[in-house]
Amino acid sequence: MDALEHDLSTEDLHPIDLVETLAERREWEFDRVGHDQIAMAVEGAWRTYSVSLAWSGYDDMLRLVSTFDMDPPKDRLPELYRALDKANDQMWGGAFSLWPEHKLMVYRYGLVMAGGGCATGGQVDAMMRAAIENSERFYPAFQLVCWGGAGADEALEIAISGNYGRA
């Protein structure tokens, strides 16, 4: 158990308090939107991701939503949706979807804590890490499909193999 996990494993801590503590430790810019919600900006290699986490006591769920701008050309939408399906098939948790009305790509993940379960620092850290790592992993593929004219299979193969990068 690392120091972060040890320090953040108290059962008395509200899930959003846990997220806030993690954000402070990671030096992420954040805004406590309310008692049950926090929003933050997390810098990745490709871009800055807007991440919000909200607690629903009714559903016993901590929900993470991470977004980045994506306004693909209409003629590329069918291929982008194929790429989204293929990307989602490669992830164990969380999923991408496109919110075209808001011009956003969205990664969503829900941590269910039914039966009185409590989130741990390790779980919250893993949620955040999955959101950013998956966004960083698939961002180049989505870009290749939308603006590079690549097919979904080709774009995912290039992005995942690591042959696509920054100059």
Image: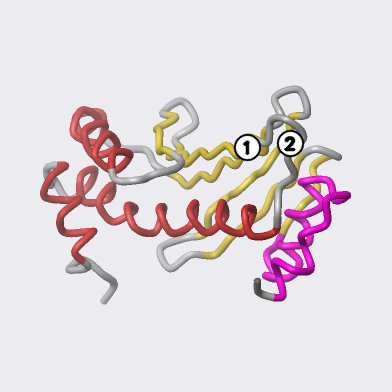
Residue 42's image quarter? bottom right
32 and 74: which is toward the camera: 32
| Residue 9 located within the stretch drawn in magenta | yes
Residue at the far top: name it.
58
Seen in the picture, residue 149 relative to 85 is either above or below; the reply is below
In the image, what residue type sits under mark 2? Answer: Trp
Q: Is residue 135 left or right of residue 80?
A: right
Task: Please say if 31 is above or below 76.
Answer: below
Q: Residues within 10 Å of mark 2 (few under 14, many from 20)?
A: many
Q: Main secondary structure of the magenta part?
A: helix
The disc placed on residue 63 is: 1
Magenta segment: 3-29
**Is label 2 in a helix, a strand or a loop?**
strand
Write the residue at 76% across / 22% down: 58
Q: Which of 132 and 127 is in front in this view?
A: 127
Question: Measuring 19% from the left and 64% from the top, which residue is drawn there?
Answer: 161
Picture coordinates of residue 143, whole percent (x, y): 27, 50
Q: Name the residue under label 2.
A: 55
The answer to the question of whether label 1 and label 2 lie on touching residues, with beta carbons closer than 8 A, is yes
Amino acid type at circle 1 is Arg
